[in-house]
Image (cartoon, rainbow, N blue to C red):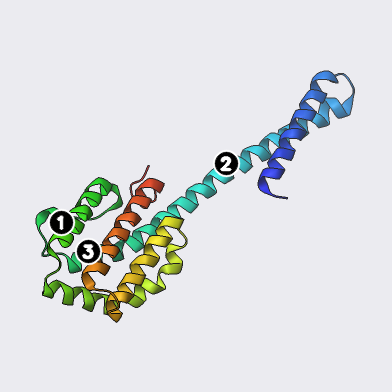
Amino acid sequence: MKKYSFASFLIVALTFMSLLAIFKAESGFFIGNIIPEMIGVCIELLIIIFVLEKWQKQEEKNKSIKVERRLREFLIFFLKHNFKDFPESCQLGDFYGKNHQQNQESIDNLINHIEQNGLKESTVLQVQSYCESEKEIFNNLIPVASDLTNDHFKSWVRIAFFMNAISAKSETTSHASLKILQNIKRFDYESHHSGLYVGAE
């Protein structure tokens, strides 16, 4: 029996027995002694079900936050390794989930800078080298990202896809880098929107 079905059964039974106890209070041992005991058992079971559910949800959220933090570390390394020489307004800082507004603005500035100025040859080579060495890690982490929300998963798949494209030179590094940054922004947004980041309330 599913949890909610069992809880519904307990609520119906509790209601029935409560009415029975109220209207048949003088009807002997069963009504006067057994029914109150059964009412108490039903109440205890309901409390256990709902407390357990809340605890399970909190445990699942804590697990998801740990997963998000580990994935975010790879994104932080990508950003800091490849775009450290960009203007101050494009620097991502710590890129922690709690700094969502700053993260979004910095990525927007970085995207706008690349769209207007392109990538220097040294940055192109750096990004290509990074993608070549790290693409398999990002590919292997796709199942891990699937444990989070649908948008986390989609953004991670696209990040991995464009890293592979840079490595295979099937996309220009500038275009693929923009796509990766857009999906890092999407990942950060989804973490904030879902409350799946360290420090979320």
Label 3, label 1: how many angstroms apart (C-alpha)? 10 Å
Quick check: marks 3 and 2 in contact, CB under 8 Å? no
Which residue matches tag 2? Answer: 51
Label 3, label 2: how many angstroms apart (C-alpha)? 41 Å
Which residue matches tag 1? Answer: 90
Q: Place residue 187 in its image quadrant.
A: bottom left
Q: Nearer the viewer, mark 3 or mark 2?
A: 3
Q: Residue at x 49, y 51 (%)?
A: 59
Q: Nearer the viewer, mark 1 or mark 2?
A: 1
**Looking at numbered disc 2 in the image, what kind of residue is underneath it?**
Val
Question: Eyeballing the image, is 42 above or below 94?
Answer: above
- Residue 197 seen: no
Which residue matches tag 3? Answer: 79
Q: Place residue 129 in its image quadrant.
A: bottom left
Label 1, label 2: how many angstroms apart (C-alpha)? 46 Å
Question: Eyeballing the image, is 157 above or below 151?
Answer: below
Answer few, some or many: residues within 10 Å of disc 2's Cα (few below 14, many 20 plus, some between 14 and 19).
few
- Residue 69 seen: yes
Residue 151, image x and y in percent? 42, 56
Secondary structure under badge 2?
Answer: helix
Residue 144, image x and y in percent? 44, 66
Left or right for 117, reference 2 = left
Q: Nearer the viewer, mark 3 or mark 1?
A: 1
Left or right for 17, reference 81 = right
**Looking at numbered disc 3 in the image, what kind of residue is underneath it?**
Leu
Residue 36, image x and y in percent? 77, 29
Which mark is first along the chain, 2 or 1?
2
Answer few, some or many: residues within 10 Å of disc 3's Cα (few below 14, many 20 plus, some between 14 and 19).
some
Q: Residue at x 60, y 40 (%)?
A: 50
